[in-house]
Image (spheres, grey):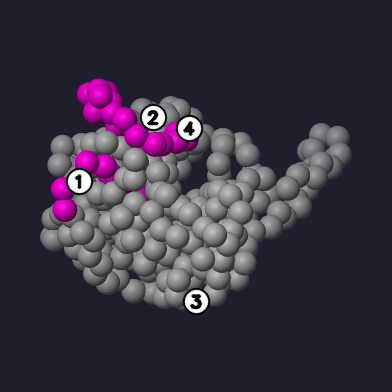
């Protein structure tokens, strides 16, 4: 199966909040629902409110394209989330170091999809311990720091210091499953403009800016299998949970509406499967309404799914 890779070159730090109201912590990738939200805001800016409404109607019935989350990239090496059931063994590394690994290079990811496990060599480990790659020695996948800020009470003039977490990626990438070719030009145009608008939190401070380095094709084996892993956040339909087994984690997603029409409206909290989760059957996911004010607001929850070998 062929997909489109969007390779991004960050021009500023990112802040992707882990929990509502928390500025200290930030995710080390960009979740698919955050990406889709930014896409919709820019799509509306370019093509208008009515065309966005029509696009969302298509997504509720038969999505014209699917997206993965955006993961780190260093030089030309793409990194993917370590599948939850991947069998990592090593004669060189302690178990606690293996447990710290969260991302694997494309070459290793393909091996895990086909075989379910791999013997890890010490020289594959990035110096920050967050990833493994066979291609070359890499120091780190991202840089992270906390920035002190001060708030001033308007009445008492008293000050209070708080800290804001930000992460600078050397590169990012995500996959697009383009099911309707007529949207290709609009998708690429929208993503390029997204680079100037920013993704994630703190955009008023210039965070989340990037350039599109290139779009290109990538292929993954789509042979039928008994197990599947996801490269996106996923909100499954109730009927999809019947009989489901696997190895997975959840994340609670909430936040506030950001659109030209609405500010300060809270989104409904939902629990979603996280990237790298593994299931015993295909799940499709859904797009769900999370706010209803001047216009409906949706959270993207479709699964970007690939078959994987699981070692029992």
Query: In the figure, residue 12 lies in which quadrant?
Result: bottom right
Nearer the camera: disc 2 or disc 4: 4
State the image coordinates of residue 18 (x, y, percent, origin top left): 55, 41
Q: Residue at x 43, y 53 (%)?
A: 81
Q: Earlier in the sequence, mark 4 or mark 3?
A: 3
Residue corresponding to mark 4:
252
Query: In the figure, residue 139 lies in which quadrant?
Result: bottom right
Nearer the camera: disc 2 or disc 1: 1
State the image coordinates of residue 166 (x, y, percent, origin top left): 62, 55
Residue corresponding to mark 2:
291
C-alpha distance separating marks 3 and 2: 46 Å
Residue corresponding to mark 3:
136
Within 10 angstroms of label 4, few (less than 14), some, or many (20 or more) residues?
Answer: few
Within 10 angstroms of label 3, few (less than 14), some, or many (20 or more) residues?
Answer: few
Find out whether the residues at labels 2 and 4 contact each other: C-beta distance under 8 Å: no
State the image coordinates of residue 87 (x, y, percent, origin top left): 42, 49
Magenta-drawn stretch contains 241: yes
Q: Earlier in the sequence, mark 3 or mark 2?
A: 3
C-alpha distance separating marks 1 and 3: 31 Å
State the image coordinates of residue 63 (x, y, percent, origin top left): 19, 45
Q: Residue at x 22, y 56 (%)?
A: 177
Nearer the camera: disc 3 or disc 2: 3
SS under mark 3? loop
SS under mark 4? strand
SS under mark 1? loop
Q: Earlier in the sequence, mark 2 or mark 4?
A: 4
Q: Earlier in the sequence, mark 4 or mark 1?
A: 1
């Amino acid at each position: 199966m062929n997909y489109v890779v969007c390779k991004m070159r960050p021009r500023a730090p990112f802040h992707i909040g882990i929990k509502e109201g928390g500025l200290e912590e930030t995710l080390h990738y960009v979740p698919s629902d955050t990406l889709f939200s930014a896409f919709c805001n820019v799509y509306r800016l370019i093509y208008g409110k009515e065309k966005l409404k029509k696009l969302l109607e298509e997504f509720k019935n038969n999505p014209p394209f699917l997206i993965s989350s955006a993961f780190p990239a260093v030089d030309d090496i793409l990194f993917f989330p370590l599948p939850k059931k991947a069998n990592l063994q090593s004669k060189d590394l302690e178990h606690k170091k293996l447990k710290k690994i969260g991302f694997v290079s494309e070459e290793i990811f393909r091996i895990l999809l086909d075989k379910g496990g791999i013997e890890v060599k010490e020289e594959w480990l990035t110096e920050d311990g967050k990833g493994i790659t066979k291609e070359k020695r890499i120091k780190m996948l991202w840089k992270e720091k906390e920035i002190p800020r001060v708030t001033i009470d308007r009445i008492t003039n008293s000050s209070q210091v708080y800290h804001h977490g930000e992460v600078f990626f050397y590169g990012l990438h995500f996959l697009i499953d383009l099911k309707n070719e007529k949207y290709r030009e609009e998708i690429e145009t929208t993503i390029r403009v997204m680079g100037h608008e920013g993704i994630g939190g703190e955009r008023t401070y210039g965070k989340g800016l990037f350039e599109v380095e290139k779009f290109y094709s990538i292929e993954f084996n789509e042979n039928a299998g008994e197990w599947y892993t996801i490269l996106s956040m996923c909100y499954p339909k109730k009927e999809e949970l019947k009989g489901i087994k696997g190895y997975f984690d959840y994340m609670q997603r909430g936040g506030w509406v950001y659109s030209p029409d609405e500010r300060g409206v809270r989104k409904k909290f939902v629990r979603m499967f996280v990237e790298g989760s593994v299931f015993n059957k295909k799940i499709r996911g859904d797009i769900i309404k999370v706010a209803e004010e001047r216009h409906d607001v949706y959270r993207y929850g479709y699964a970007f799914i690939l078959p994987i070998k699981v070692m029992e």
